[in-house]
Image (cartoon, helix red, strand yellow):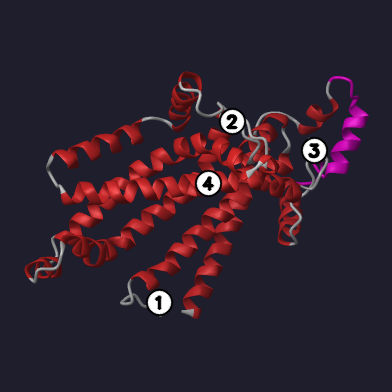
Amino acid sequence: MRGYAARRVAALAVTLLFVSALVFVVVRVLPGDPVAVIMGTEGGREAGDRLRRAMGLDRPLPLQYLTWVAGALRGDLGRSIQYDVPVGALILSRLPVTLPLTLLAAAFMVLAALPLGLYAATRHRRAGDYAAMIVSQIGISVPQFWSGLLLILFFSVRLGWVRSGGFDGWSAGVGPALRSLLLPAVALGFFQAAVLVRATRSAVLDVLREDYVRTARAKGVSEPRVLARHTLRNALIPIVTVAGIQLGQLVAGSIVLESVFALPGLGRLALGAITARDLPVVQGVALFVASVIVVINFAVDLAYGLLDPRIRYE
């Protein structure tokens, strides 16, 4: 187990190194000059050159990259051009919005997908199965930003149950904060839940065809016990695999939904940084999101051994 974990950590380090290089190159080839954005139309060429030297933008790209990576390894992601604060502190200040939003969306994804997928599998090729697949297809077909707008139109504009956007902060109370995050969490998790429904249905159908399930039923084991102990338990590995992938996509997908619902999280921070050509923030957010996704995949790999004792890592 330790040897496997060490190999996986080494592979994750190489992956993050590759991602960091890709992010650095992509950010640098984007149109626009951060020095011109900072100085506007009033800055002269000499002042621009001095600012470029101060920001290190006059050095060769490989040297800029190595300097940034060395700082990131020390926990220093640079300083924001737009806000004039450390990028790490800026990311941490937005996590109280993005992290609960992602967790709520993940909870909605799991609580909606597992029962619906199990229901569809146990009613294979019947009305319940077809209804579940129609709901799943709708969830896959509707873009997240469009589902967010539809939720705002119905629950905020028509019914007036919740606000259409904004976030007052956790200081206003847990209840109001969660209500502000409820609609975006549903919109964010709807697509991922639709994918997980299909994965759950497929995995459960495969297990239901196994001989030990037929034997359990022949022995008179109750259907709920057959589904919970013998079926769902043995179908968890493919379900957890897909759920881990979807959880990583929830973190990345929050960028669009936070803009739709005007939430001051990592998504709006990244979009604002791209508009302002705030290179350190763009690089820092991209590296942070990639690190979270890599860690989630690592946790899913380690969970396989807990779900199925037959799996050996050595």
In the image, is residue 236 above or below residue 261? below
Cα gap from disc 1 to disc 2, whole angstroms: 42 Å
Query: Image quadrant of residue 130?
Result: top left
The reply to whether dot 3 and dot 4 touch (C-beta < 8 Å) is no
**Residue 161 placement (x, y as % from top left):** 50, 28
Q: Please tell me the numbered disc located at residue 313.
A: 1
Q: Earlier in the sequence, mark 3 or mark 2?
A: 3
Residue to which mark 2 is pinned: 259
**Which residue range is magenta in the image?**
41-60
Q: Secondary structure at mark 2?
A: helix
Cα gap from disc 4 to disc 2, whole angstroms: 15 Å
Cα gap from disc 1 to disc 4, whole angstroms: 30 Å
Q: Amino acid at mark 4?
A: Thr
Q: Amino acid at mark 1?
A: Tyr
Q: Secondary structure at mark 1?
A: loop
Q: Nearer the viewer, mark 1 or mark 2?
A: 2
Between 217 and 310, the residue placed more toward the observer is: 217
Quarter that holds the C terminus: bottom left
Q: Secondary structure at mark 4?
A: helix
Residue to which mark 4 is pinned: 102
Query: Image quadrant of residue 134?
Result: top left
**Residue at the limit of the structure toward the left, as seen here:** 218
Q: Please tell me the numbered disc located at residue 81.
A: 3
